[in-house]
Amino acid sequence: MKKIYFVRHGESEGNRFKIHQSTDTPLTEIGLSQAEIVALRFNKIPDVEIIITSPCLRAQQTANAIANKNNLRIETNELFTEKRIPSQLIGLSHQSQQSLTIRGEIDKHLFEQDGKWRHSDEETVHEFVQRAGQVLEFLSQRAESKIIVVCHALILHMIFTKILNPTGNLETLYAINDHLEFNNTSISVAWYNCEQKQWKINCLNDHSHLG
């Protein structure tokens, strides 16, 4: 049996100001404090063997805080990065006209079955769903039995959506996806039964450590 602790990174500048983020968007002062607080929770969770983190700076900063307080090794893996958005959006407000127009265009093509339509250089929804499946396969094959994963809201949405409905079509997956929420530094826990080859959710979006 494997136990995976999924942690969303602390508050970033992009989260705070509601702007589209790059890979090097840092944590705010609040986010850094949140990372220190969630790190203390893992003092009470024994036998964690490794932290696997997204390469994005905000996730790295959160992972480093946890690692430093718990003497854990960090491994970086691109599978856990946030969903790649069109590069034209980076730095723009979520409510800017350009952002609304581009995201509206993408939404019009969201459920096209061939999955070939692409606005520009973003990760398509088909690619994103496939990557979430690759995340679960990757974690199921790890030798460690207790792992912390530090990543991002959208990839967490899709990982847990895939656990809940591993064979669903896009419409079904997004219907589930829309009803999940992951706060900054929340902890969500999933078990993997190696004999039955089955994932189960143990806990979602626990951010009680923030008060």
Image (tube, helix red, strand yellow):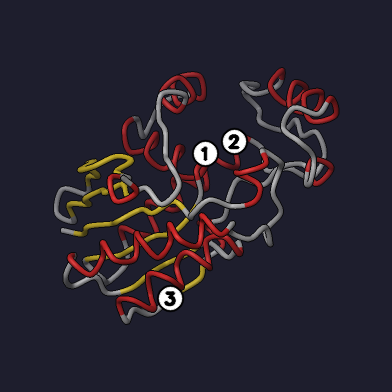
Circles 1 and 2, Cβ within 8 Å, touching? The answer is yes
Q: Earlier in the sequence, mark 1 or mark 3?
A: 3
- Distance CA(mark 1)–CA(mark 2): 5 Å
**Position of the N terminus by quadrant:** bottom left
- Residue shown at 26% from the left, 71% from the top: 144
Q: Is residue 56 above or below residue 206?
A: below
Q: Nearer the viewer, residue 4 or 124?
A: 4
Kind of residue at badge 1 = Val
Q: Position of residue 35 (x, y in %)?
A: 43, 61
**Position of the C terminus by quadrant:** top left
The residue wearing badge 1 is 129
- Distance CA(mark 1)–CA(mark 3): 25 Å
Closer to the eye: label 2 or 3: 3
The residue wearing badge 3 is 74
Q: Earlier in the sequence, mark 2 or mark 3?
A: 3
Q: Is residue 96 left or right of residue 123?
A: right
Q: Is residue 115 left or right of residue 206?
A: right
The 10 Å Cα crowd at callout 1, few under 14, some 14 to 19, many 20 or more, is many
The 10 Å Cα crowd at callout 3, few under 14, some 14 to 19, many 20 or more, is many
Kind of residue at badge 3 = Ile
Label 1: element kind: helix
Q: Position of residue 109 (x, y in %)?
A: 70, 21
Kind of residue at badge 2 = His
Q: Is residue 163 above or below residue 29?
A: above
Q: Is residue 60 above or below residue 171?
A: below
Q: Nearer the viewer, residue 88 or 27?
A: 27
Q: Quadrant of residue 172?
A: top left
The residue wearing badge 2 is 126
